[in-house]
Amino acid sequence: MRLLPPALWGRFIKRRLPTSLWGRSLLIIVLPVLLMQVAVTWAFFDAHWQTVTARLSDGLAGDIAWAAASYGDNPTPQNMAVIAERAERSMQLSIAFQEGDVLPRDQRRGLLGVVDRTLDSALAARLDQPYWFDTTRYPAYIDVQVQTPTGVMRVIAPRERAVATQAHIFVIWLTLATILLMSVAILFIRNQVRAIERLADAAQAFGRGESPRFKPHGAREVRSAALAFIDMRQRIQRYIEQRTALLASVSHDLRTPLTRLRLELALAEPTKRTAAMQRDLDEMEHMIDEYLAFARGEAGEAAEAVDVPGLLRGLAADVVRRGAEAEVVAPQDLELTARPMALKRALANLADNAAAHGTRVRLSARRLASGDVEIAVEDDGPGIPEPLREEAFRPFSRLDESRNQNRKGVGLGLAIARDVARGHGGEILLDDSDLGGLRAALRIPG
């Protein structure tokens, strides 16, 4: 069998290691403790238990050899009675002679075989006669039988005469101590990891436009990172507030002259020139709305339950007013927790793009197996080539060649939609539609 190169072994092991901080910290604590317990247990059995068991087995084998030799010197019932009485009183051995019997042929051995091998070695070194023993039939005793010319001498010995029976107590105490220490370590690690998880949750919530209450916890380094995050959040919030105030002022300043121009055009005589100027004003107002929407966003809006089918039906009506066919495919009971105005603006941009470049538009929604809600807008237009799809999300990108020249707007529709999706913790994916055009799927955690 060919061995993998060290680099492949490294990648193989790395793929199977835990990826979370909790899993890796647990592995750092648990693995050394388990290895230490195995090493200590192995050393104990190798250096202590087997040595004691070998000495006990050797002592038992010596007592049995004495009994067999004493009976061989005077093979009479009277001598056997004396040997049995002495063995019972001094050696805790129960000896009985079975005249005319032979040794059993079947061999019964324990699962591990350590006791059997040790006792067999001791009996072989001490006895010249054939023998047989069984360490499994009686839990507290060992049965040893020795063949003599006239029969079988059977010896029943307490198990502690041949085996160090208290070794398991050491293993139990070692295991209990290990479990206790590991439990304390796991609880400590869990508390430290939970502090980092809270910091990550707070960062994700802030990225979605929420402002959860967050208090630093955990070790000094984690608290330092949490305090740095709080300072950063406050600076960003101040920047957002300042930008919002500036945009509100700019919006007011720009809309005032636009309103005066619109009023003057309304009072002027209708001509082709005034109609063209009216269209220019409409386009300018639309451009200003897109600029402000992209720069301002909807971060200050509170999240609430949104009726997805109702929202899609409203968008479908807008698509029909623009001259395209529209269909809605969505479960009637589908709801989504989101910022309603921001979500509507993102989907309206997608629907407007679809209606501008196609004659059929499909608005669909479903709940994925992951729990996310996917809202898709499809059209039968020219679509967007795959190499240009990421570029389509760039602000002010028009993709003239791929979308028959974006005649209206400034190329912020997809950028605003992606900003809204990511502000909800989701994403927008572009793909080919079975209608023949583009499929824009907005996925938001449900």
Image (cartoon, rainbow, N blue to C red):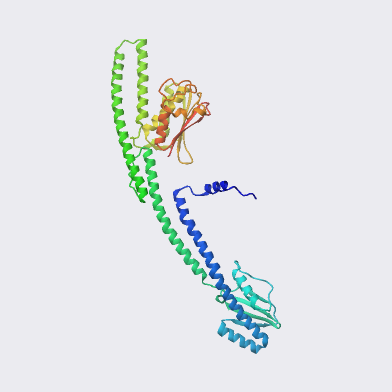
Left or right of 204? Residue 358 is right
Residue 157 placed where, x, y %? Answer: 58, 78
Which residue is depicted at the point 44% across and 50% down? 22
Residue 384 placed where, x, y %? Answer: 50, 26
Residue 153 placed where, x, y %? Answer: 65, 81
Q: Is residue 131 above or below residue 20?
A: below
Left or right of 214? Residue 46 is right
Which residue is depicted at the point 32% across and 41% down? 231
Q: Is residue 329 visible?
A: no
Q: Classify residue 67 by image quadrant.
A: bottom right
Quick one: 285 or 203, which is closer to the camera? 203
Q: Is residue 36 visible?
A: yes
Q: Classify residue 444 by image quadrant.
A: top left
The residue lying furthest to the front in this view is 6
The residue lying furthest to the bottom in this view is 78
Q: Is residue 183 above or below residue 156?
A: above
Residue 335 placed where, x, y %? Answer: 41, 37
Left or right of 408? Residue 381 is right
Q: Is residue 357 above or below residue 87?
A: above
For the image shown, how many numbered marks are present on the structure?
Answer: 0
Q: Where is the C terminus found, in terms of image quarters?
A: top left
Quick one: 339 or 45, which is closer to the camera? 45
Which residue is depicted at the point 66% across and 71% down? 107
Left or right of 126? Residue 182 is left
Quick one: 110 or 348, which is closer to the camera? 110
